[in-house]
């Protein structure tokens, strides 16, 4: 039937489309009028056509990603109850966040042997505790997510010192050959203001430091953590570009591994007031993560109901043949690879962190976005445009975003989360006080 209908229409080439557009512009310059340059230096065209379509092969990802609930361990019994409730509500993945060692038996009571995927965000490094945790979860799918380089980037310090931290990782890798031990927390860069190209490049340079230290055969023990923002198609393309480049780099080491990607909504664009707007933003960010090919999706700021939507979970085939997404993916790939090569030529990621080069580049992009936010070129509904009146600070404030920053001595300049609306919100809070 489709062929029968389409046979009545002559195919039109990309050149014919462009010629028609130029005629309609009535002398206006095509490039200046219709081509858009993004902060990343990516060019967006007014149309995409099969004639100039260049497809790159992206390694396959999960069709039905896991749904993850974050549980903070401040009280083991409470954390256990929260985790059980999330599981009963349909969550099949849990991420436990802890600042100190905890009672493992209490936290995991009635949670084992239920096909739950366990993730960890441990803000400490204890080899003894980690070995106990690994042994306890020996029959479960678990991701320790230890990222000593990420900790240095985020806090400005090692857990103990460079040699001790790397030795701890080495011991854990040797004693636990089959477990996911390491992670690369690329969410740090997005939440601080890095653009999509920088995030991909820094994630690659970040993991390459681990390859240099331990060999690329550890690739099967690494999980990548990305934060997805609200630039819908760019965020889809970002994850796809990373998958492609990661595969490319591993091929240079004569090894292979399918990247395990954990995605969570960005903090960068979240607002302190009117929590519901954060939910709306997160919904599209979650869709981007799914369509990009993430293995596990955090439901932070969102709900289990959205993530359980089977239509959402089975729509990755939509990106196949979409010329716009393919074109953006290719541009992100090319630009990120250029940055990655520059970092490696300059001594590697750790070297550039110590020099402050990575921090400076992120800050430059973050400031560019901040200027766009303040001039309302970059719009956050409810923050810098269509602002809603605050009815009650207690009800309207998202307390999870109120982070107290402690001044401390650091080895390097830390890469810290910086929300676009912080300055504006501080002004509001002063006026309401």
Image (tube, rainbow, N blue to C red):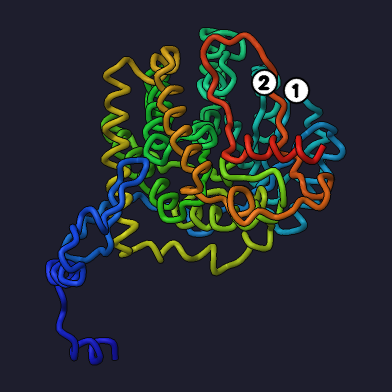
Q: Give the camera-side residue of 91 and 18.
A: 18
Q: Residue furthest right?
A: 77
- For label 2, the residue is 124
Marks 2 and 1, Cα distance to the nearest angstrom? Answer: 6 Å
Q: Is residue 363 left or right of residue 27?
A: right
Report which quarter residue 220 is drawn in: top left
Q: SS for tag 2?
A: loop
- For label 1, the residue is 100
Residue shown at 51% from the left, 28% from the top: 177
Residue shown at 30% from the left, 52% from the top: 36
Q: Give the camera-side residue of 295 and 362.
A: 362
Q: Are marks 2 and 1 in contact (CB under 8 Å)?
A: yes
Position in image of residue 7 (x %, y %): 18, 88
Q: Is residue 201 above or below residue 214?
A: below
User: Could you classify mark 1 by the number of other residues whose Cα lies within 10 Å: few (under 14), some (14-19), or many (20 or more)?
Assistant: few
Q: Is residue 128 above or below residue 378?
A: above
Camera sees residue 426: yes
Residue shown at 12% from the left, 67% from the top: 15
Q: SS for tag 1?
A: loop
Q: Is residue 71 above or below residue 50?
A: above
Residue 33 numbered tag: none
Residue shown at 79% from the left, 41% from the top: 432
Quarter of the rendering occupied by the N terminus = bottom left
Q: Is residue 106 left or right of residue 349?
A: right
Q: Is residue 160 left or right of residue 206?
A: right
Quarter of the rendering occupied by the C terminus = top right
User: Could you classify mark 2 by the number of other residues whose Cα lies within 10 Å: few (under 14), some (14-19), or many (20 or more)?
Assistant: some
Camera sees residue 173: no
Position in image of residue 376 (x %, y %): 51, 48
Position in image of residue 62 (x %, y %): 48, 54
Label count reads 2
Mark 2 or mark 1, earlier in chain: 1
């Amino acid at each position: 039937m489709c062929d029968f209908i389409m046979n009545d229409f002559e195919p039109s080439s990309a050149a014919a489309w462009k010629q028609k557009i130029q005629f309609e512009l009535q002398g206006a310059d095509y490039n200046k009028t219709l081509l858009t340059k993004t902060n990343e230096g990516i060019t967006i065209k007014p149309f995409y056509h099969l004639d100039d379509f260049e497809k790159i092969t992206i390694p396959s990802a999960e069709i039905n990603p896991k749904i993850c609930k974050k549980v903070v361990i401040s009280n083991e019994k409470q954390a256990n109850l929260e985790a059980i409730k999330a599981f009963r509500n349909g969550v099949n993945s849990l991420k436990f966040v802890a600042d100190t060692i905890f009672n493992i038996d209490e936290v995991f009571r009635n949670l084992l042997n239920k096909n739950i995927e366990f993730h960890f965000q441990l803000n400490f490094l204890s080899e003894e505790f980690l070995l106990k945790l690994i042994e306890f979860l020996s029959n479960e799918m678990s991701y320790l997510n230890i990222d000593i380089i990420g900790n240095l980037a985020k806090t400005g310090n090692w857990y103990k010192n460079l040699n001790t931290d790397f030795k701890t990782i080495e011991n854990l890798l040797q004693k636990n050959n089959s477990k996911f031990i390491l992670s690369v927390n690329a969410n740090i860069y997005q939440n601080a203001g890095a653009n999509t190209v920088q995030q991909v490049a820094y994630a690659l340079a970040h993991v390459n430091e681990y390859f240099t230290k331990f060999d690329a055969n550890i690739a099967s023990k690494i999980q990548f953590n990305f934060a997805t923002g609200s630039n819908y198609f760019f965020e889809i393309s970002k994850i796809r570009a990373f998958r492609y480049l990661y595969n490319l780099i591993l091929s240079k080491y004569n090894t292979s591994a399918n990247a395990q990607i954990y995605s969570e909504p960005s903090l960068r664009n979240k607002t302190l007031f009117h929590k519901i707007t954060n939910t709306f933003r997160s919904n599209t960010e979650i869709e981007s993560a799914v369509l990009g090919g993430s293995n596990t999706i955090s439901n932070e700021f969102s709900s289990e109901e959205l993530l359980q939507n089977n239509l959402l979970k089975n729509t990755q085939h939509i990106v196949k043949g979409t010329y716009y997404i393919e074109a953006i993916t290719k541009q992100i790939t090319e630009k990120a690879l250029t940055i990655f090569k520059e970092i490696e030529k300059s001594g590697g990621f750790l070297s550039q962190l110590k020099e402050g080069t990575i921090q400076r580049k992120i800050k430059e992009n973050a400031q560019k976005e901040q200027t766009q936010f303040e001039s309302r070129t970059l719009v956050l509904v409810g923050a810098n445009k269509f602002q809603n009146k605050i009815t009650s600070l207690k009800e309207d404030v998202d307390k999870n975003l109120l982070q107290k920053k402690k001044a401390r001595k650091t080895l390097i300049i830390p890469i810290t989360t910086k929300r676009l609306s912080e300055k504006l919100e501080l002004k509001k809070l002063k006026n309401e006080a």
